[in-house]
Image (cartoon, rainbow, N blue to C red):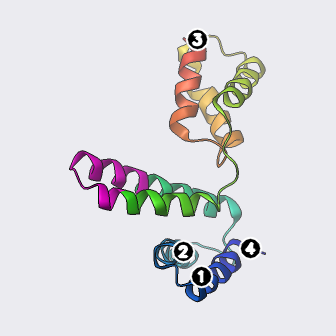
Amino acid sequence: MNLTDKINNDIKAAMLAKEKEKLEALRAIKSALLLLSTEKGASENTNEEAELKMLQKLVKQRKEAAEIFRTQGRADLADVEEFQSKIIEVYLPAQLSEDEIKNAVQQIITQTGAASAADFGKVMGIAAKQLGGKADGKIISAVVKQLLA
């Protein structure tokens, strides 16, 4: 079952259960999927990698919005954004821990022979491909910088 089918089934279930907040988050995912599939150059079936990137983008947007709302003293709006980000994260693969990221980056550094911060781009390119969807890019970048320093 692909992501679109899962979302459609979950929308139906949320409607039947009258879960308004969850339904709102699921409809946001469905909307983003439709945009992804209709954008210029999109194939008939969008690939899983593009869907993962889209889901990560939605989660990041929700978390950033929640942070802004918190700084402005709007906890009610921040709670809604955080709830939606948790719903969207359900459809992402399990995220790697920082130790797992360090181990993976260390292996990449060993394979590429990187020795200094000048090799950051080379290591980061490979790490982003290997760990994409499983870890946040900011965390990967911070680990690479730390290990190359």
Residue receiving disc 4: 2
Q: Is residue 24 above or below residue 133?
A: below
Tell which tag, 2 or 3, sits nearer the viewer.
2
Q: Amino acid at mark 1?
A: Ile
Identify the mark nearer the N-term, 4 or 3. Answer: 4
Tell which tag, 2 or 4, sits nearer the viewer.
2
Image quarter of residue 77:
bottom left
Q: Amino acid at mark 3?
A: Ser
Q: CA distance from mark 4 to mark 1?
A: 14 Å
Mark 2 burial class by Cα count in 10 Å: few <14, some 14-19, many 20+: many
Image quarter of residue 134:
top right
Q: Which mark is residue 116?
A: 3
Q: Is residue 89 above or below residue 110?
A: below
Residue at x 73%, y 25% (from the top left corner): 108
Identify the mark nearer the N-term, 1 or 3. Answer: 1
Identify the mark nearer the N-term, 1 or 2. Answer: 1
Residue 122 picture location, percent across and down = 62, 27
Q: Nearer the viewer, residue 81 or 118?
A: 81
- Image: magenta residue range: 62-78
Residue at x 53%, y 20% (from the top left corner): 145
Residue receiving disc 1: 11
Left or right: where does residue 118 sit relative to residue 46?
left
Residue at x 54%, y 33% (from the top left corner): 139
| Callouts 1 and 2 close, C-beta under 8 Å | yes
Residue receiving disc 2: 26
Q: CA distance from mark 1 to mark 2?
A: 6 Å
Q: CA distance from mark 1 to mark 3?
A: 49 Å
Outermost front residue = 17
Q: Amino acid at mark 4?
A: Asn
Q: Amino acid at mark 2?
A: Leu
Q: Is residue 69 magenta?
A: yes
